[in-house]
Image: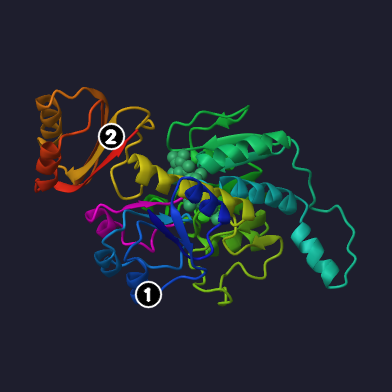
Amino acid sequence: MKVLLLENIHPIAVEILEARGFEVELRPGSLSEDELIAALADVHLLGIRSNTTITPRVLEHASELLAIGCFCIGTNQVDLAAAAERGIAVFNAPYSNTRSVVELVIAEIIVLARRLAEKTQRMHDGVWDKSAKGSHEVRGRTLGIVGYGNIGTQLSNLAEAMGLRVIFFDTADRLAHGNARRVSTLDELLAEADVVSIHVDGRPGNAGLFGAEQFAKMKPRSLFINASRGMVVDDVALREHILSGHIAGAALDVFPVEPKAQGDEFTSVLRGLDNVILTPHVGGSTQEAQEEIGYFVAGKLAGFALQGQTALSVNLPAVQAPDLDRGYRVGYLHINVPGVLAGVNQALAEQGDNVIGQYLSTRGQQGYVVTDAVDPLSDDVLKRLIDSPHTIWLRTWQA
Ligand SMILES: NC(=O)c1ccc[n+]([C@@H]2O[C@H](COP(=O)([O-])OP(=O)(O)OC[C@H]3O[C@@H](n4cnc5c(N)ncnc54)[C@H](O)[C@@H]3O)[C@@H](O)[C@H]2O)c1
């Protein structure tokens, strides 16, 4: 099978795919719509990052394409519904940069507590201002984590290792790590925390989660960090609380409106404030995260092509079956109407085939069933299933 990787994807992806028998072609940049159509004629798996746009027209012409790997976090650049309609699986790497975000936040907690951003700026301006005023150790202080998911929990562990006390608030039931303590309301967390760090997801209900009311409820001289989503925080309210001195410092990596292109001007009401660290959405941007993304997405593409695995696909029903070590596998993506699964099982029963395992998942209008059996399906049965009006695709594998 042929793989095309665009946009300088990390070499570990090439290593993984070649080791599993794929023929890999690399191109450094992204391609336009017409260039993609020409390039994809005989390609089975495509790897892109955020600069390649996959439109319905591209998909329509990519007759051999089985799956697209987005070697990044976002998948907005791909028309996911159009890909799903054609049975083309799309994968990404939602959690490969968790550690990078956590390390940035850990650094920011100390930098804010010691007012280092301000101090280094003064030194660059030629001012020697040696003073302990407003500088604190982080040991013994309370970190309040809002959103205790992948990033929140890792942050919890590292922060405790530095001697911080951790409390957290999450709308879902989350197990406390280490000595961290769950609090039952956001207000409780705001009243207790010396540092508040936001790590909620991007669900629409989180827009404006942090505004004037929440900042007012934070402890006087506390610190605020947001490396989650820009829309979560009202930057104007934050500015007012920093200018009033109620909030002693803040670190922001994400903004309600972010520049589109490298070098574009960054406009924000938070520019020019003392002890405010502004970074250009780089929480997850490290070489290690790139390597992790390369490893993760290449594995997903190979697992889909060679084993029919769709776990963590962002657009097809997700099935994680064990790797096939004996017998035959049939992966059947179909329109989710009553009776399809019964039809597959009846076909197996008719030919006396013994089922080893069967895994089913549905998503929206589609269903995906993976069936492992001792014997291969006969050509007649395969033809009957393939000819069904409910079939999107059917693929078979042998151990
Ligand atoms: N700055 C960056 O470069 C960068 C990189 C990676 C991820 N992120 C962002 O970080 C955030 C966290 O990522 P993650 O992987 O930990 O996500 P996650 O889905 O694992 O965790 C999010 C947690 O927030 C909780 N939550 C949602 N809304 C809440 C609310 N209103 N109050 C309290 N808890 C709430 C959820 O229950 C969940 O436990 C996401 O928004 C993600 O987009 C930013």
| SS category of the residue bearing label 1 | helix
N-term mark: 2 or 1: 1
Residue at 29 percent of width and 59 percent of height: 64
- 395 displayed left or right of 384: right
Q: Residues within 10 Å of mark 2 (few under 14, many from 20)?
A: many
Query: Image check: 378 left or right of 171?
Result: left
At 12% from the left edge and 37% from the top edge, which residue is drawn? 381
Point 72% across, 53% down: residue: 112
- List x then y, in percent, for residue 257: 48, 68
Q: Residue 312's quadrant in the figure? A: top left
Residue 225 visible within the image: yes
Q: Nearer the viewer, residue 90 or 161?
A: 90
Apparent side of residue 3 relative to residue 271 in the rendered image (left or right): left
> Relative to 5, is 148 above or below?
above
- Residue assigned mark 1: 35
Residue 227 at x, y percent in the picture:
56, 53
Residue 329 shows which numbered tag? 2
Which stretch did the figure color magenta? 74-94
Q: Is residue 337 visible?
A: no
Q: Nearer the viewer, residue 186 or 61?
A: 61
Residue 163: image location, x then y, percent: 73, 34
